[in-house]
Amino acid sequence: MTHTYLSQRQPNPETFAEELAKEFDNTRSFSSHEDSAKFVRDVALDGIQTIIRLALRLESVFKVDITSSDMFLLFENRGTPFDDAKMTNEYGSDGVASPGRRDKRGRRYKIAGTTEVGVGKSICEGSGKSRRKVILLKTNVVLNTDVAGSGK
């Protein structure tokens, strides 16, 4: 039943309630159709309206929000300076995830490798406006200082 009502513009909650009352009739849950229809209207009509509203929102998310944005994977190359805005330090060594932190030699912390890719999307904020990138999931990285012998 959900599939039938999901694709329509504005499903009528009363029609859906009537269909549900018919299902109660089929199971002989109530002594008459009027009793089952009254029960559905009294107990479930608000819930049906909420389900329809959420289903329409979900449909919009899948048809508009996701498909109208450009999704992409994020990964970092070896030697890239660590950036906590788009990366997570997999091993979290000594608070180096703070922006601008440097090693003992005064160098910025560098990436030894990517352990898990991140996810980003490019969003157009309206007609004639530029696109902006949003990071949905940060890339997990390992720093040179966390790999034995590489920081020396």
Image (cartoon, rainbow, N blue to C red):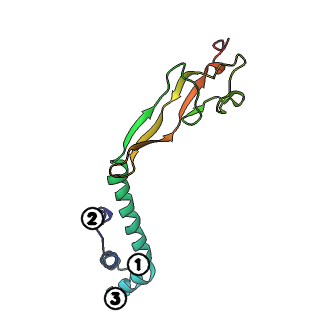
Question: Could you tell me which quadrant the N terminus lies in?
Answer: bottom left
Residue occupying the point 29% across, 77% down: 15
Find disc 1 in the rendering and name its residue: 45
Q: How far, Cα to Cα, is label 1 from label 2?
A: 18 Å
Q: Is residue 42 left or right of residue 127?
A: right
On the image, the x and y values in percent for residue 76 come to 50, 26
Depicted 67 relative to depicted 8: above or below: above
Q: Amino acid at mark 3?
A: Glu
Depicted 78 relative to depicted 24: above or below: above
Find disc 3 in the rendering and name its residue: 34
Find disc 2 in the rendering and name its residue: 4
Q: Is residue 123 left or right of residue 116?
A: left
**Badge 1: how crowded within 10 Å, few (<14), some, or many (20+)?**
some
On the image, the x and y values in percent for residue 132 come to 43, 43
Q: How far, Cα to Cα, is label 2 from label 3?
A: 24 Å
**Badge 2: how crowded within 10 Å, few (<14), some, or many (20+)?**
few
- Name the front one of labels 2 and 3: 2
- Disc 2 secondary structure class: helix
Residues at discs 2 and 3 in contact (Cβ within 8 Å): no
Sequence-wise, which precedes: disc 1 or disc 2? 2
